[in-house]
Image (tube, grey):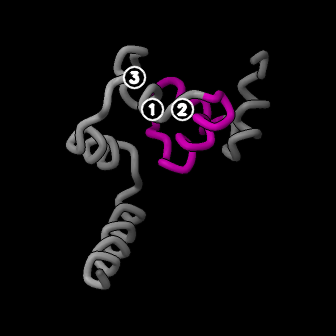
Amino acid sequence: MKFTQEQFAELIGISSSSYTRIENAFQKPSLDTLIKISQNLKISLDYIIFGSESRKNEKSSKSDIIDALFIYTDKEKLSHTVSVLDKLIKAL
């Protein structure tokens, strides 16, 4: 898409140094960052997380999705998400 690293980092709302650390696998991106990357590159989160075109078209199992959440989500955000889901389940 002909973005520089700095331009793409700005587009997805992170610093260019964070972008470089993510690209070089020194830092894991947050789920929010993964979503922004997915939206701006117009590719699915499955493709970003699982990394292959064939996997992109397969239906992900629930365990694959849960694994990805644990790997790529900040633990505090994940805890909050679990709390919200627990409340929703109890409300049903």
Other residues around mark 1 within 10 Å, as few (<14) / some (14–19) / many (≥20): few
The CA span between labels 3 and 1 is 29 Å
Q: x, y (%) of residue 32? A: 55, 50
Q: Disc 3 on helix, strand or loop? A: helix
Q: Nearer the viewer, mark 3 or mark 1?
A: 3
In the picture, the quarter occupied by the N terminus is top right
Residue type pointed to by label 3: Asn
In the picture, the quarter occupied by the C terminus is bottom left
Closer to the N terminus: mark 3 or mark 2? 2
- Residue 44 relative to residue 6: left or right: left
Residue type pointed to by label 2: Arg
Is the Cβ of the residue at disc 3 closer than 8 Å to that at disc 1?
no
Asked where in the image residue 19 lies, by quadrant, the reply is top right
Asked where in the image residue 47 lies, by quadrant, the reply is top left
Q: x, y (%) of residue 26? A: 45, 32
Query: 55 or 31, which is in the foreground?
Result: 55
Which residue is labeled 1 in the image? Answer: 26
Kindly identify which numbered label has been placed on residue 3: none
Q: Which residues are magenta?
A: 17-42
Which residue is labeled 2 in the image? Answer: 21
Is the Cβ of the residue at disc 1 closer than 8 Å to that at disc 2?
yes
- The answer to whether residue 65 is magenta is no
- For image coordinates 60% across by 39% down, the residue present is 18
